[in-house]
Image (spheres, helix red, strand yellow):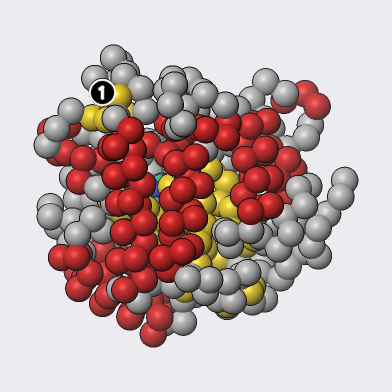
Amino acid sequence: MQRHNVAAYPDSQLVFPCGKIMKNRFMLAPLTNMQSHEDGTLSGDEKHWLTMRAKGQFGLVMTCAALVQFNGKCWSGQLGIYSDGHIEGLRSLANDLRNEGSLSVVQLHHGGMRSYAALAGEMSVCPSENVEHDARAMTLEEVEETRDHFIAAAVRAKNSGFDGVEVHGAHGYLVAQFLSAETNQRTDRYGGNLENRSRLLFEIIDGIREACGSDFLLGVRLSPERFGMELAEVKELCGILVAKGQVDFLDISLWDVFKTPEGSEEDGKLLLDHFTEMDRKGVKLTVAGKIYGGKEVHKVLDAGVDFVTVGRSGILHHDFPEKVMTNPGFKSTEIPVASDYLRSEGLGESFIKYMQRWKGFVED
Ligand SMILES: Cc1cc2nc3c(=O)[nH]c(=O)nc-3n(C[C@H](O)[C@H](O)[C@H](O)COP(=O)(O)O)c2cc1C
């Protein structure tokens, strides 16, 4: 199999195409934590939990899915970046993350049909009518407006001092709903073949690059399968993203970094291999899913991934990177853990309550 980079050491720095430098190979995954104020402004709890991760040596700290347009709201306590009123809080977070030596990135999100009408204040919207989710199709003007909201949110992130943004194109939210042939039945220029279904994503990317400049860190998160996505199409899409040369990194959300693609378990080829074998032309690759210790970190980097993305282990250990860099044999603590343990790791009450919904994570 062709490899395009030499395996990286976890503590080695990484230079993105935009020129930003990450001090090591650990990114904190975007993690919804429901700790924002109801108007989307940043709370002390949210700032504390993220800053603690930067102190624990995550070279890049990403925020949770932050809302770019009010009608896409999915969760109570979701971070907002849809208004200038959010800038003050975001600026103080960006400052703290920078002071700890971490790159800072906001994940840009719109829930589409998965938004929660009671919170979003109106019926959910999506590419095409969806009866199951009680969602209506967006008009052409609405699609263009939403694209512009993503771009405006990226400008707010930049003005707040963030190093960059990641467009959330995974997990079946709005951008993924457009990418998927299952949920996108449009007949205008945003529906039909892959070029049309990915038009919204590419217009968002081009718009962000144009508005935020060549030194702004820009990533895209994609689901390679499930959520209405086809692996072959996602690979094709990644190839186009690489060829266009506008993004700095691809964040492939695997949920298990060592899984095989659905339906082709027997041939032994990992889902991960489909992405490491691509010619990425300098665009960096990260993956997330069950990286629970030094063993997985090393295996993933050895496989040719540029940096690892860590979710639940980063909740359990604010200093997961530091622990792995000093002890390659380090393993995350066993779950379930006590609420008090999570408090000691910097989670506030709303986040702990949310983690109780993740089966087996918090003791009863
Ligand atoms: C509590 C929780 C919240 C999450 N919130 C987000 C989110 O806001 N945006 C996103 O793209 N993924 C989200 N995810 C997925 C994670 O970013 C990550 O991809 C996933 O948890 C797999 O990594 P892990 O096994 O290291 O936890 C969330 C996962 C968890 C456990």
Which residue in the rendered view is the most extreme toward the top? Answer: 131
Could you say where residue 273 lies in the image, as x and y percent from the top left?
74, 43
Structural crowding at the residue carrying mark 1, measured as other residues with C-alpha within 10 Å and reported as few (<14), some (14–19) or many (≥20): some
Whether residue 289 is visible, yes or no, is no
Looking at the rendering, which quadrant does residue 95 occupy? bottom left
Whether residue 140 is visible, yes or no, is yes
Looking at the image, is 300 positioned above or below residue 134?
A: below
Q: Residue at x 51, y 47 (%)?
A: 202
Does residue 59 appear to the left or right of 9 in the view shown?
left
Secondary structure under tag 1 reads: strand
Q: Which residue is mark 1?
A: 136
Does residue 83 appear to the left or right of 223 in the view shown?
left
Looking at the image, is 127 positioned above or below residue 254?
A: above
Could you say where residue 94 lies in the image, as x and y percent from the top left?
34, 75
* Residue type (three-letter) at the residue carrying disc 1: Arg
Does residue 92 appear to the left or right of 218 in the view shown?
left
Q: Residue at x 24, y 20 (%)?
A: 134
Q: How many marks?
A: 1
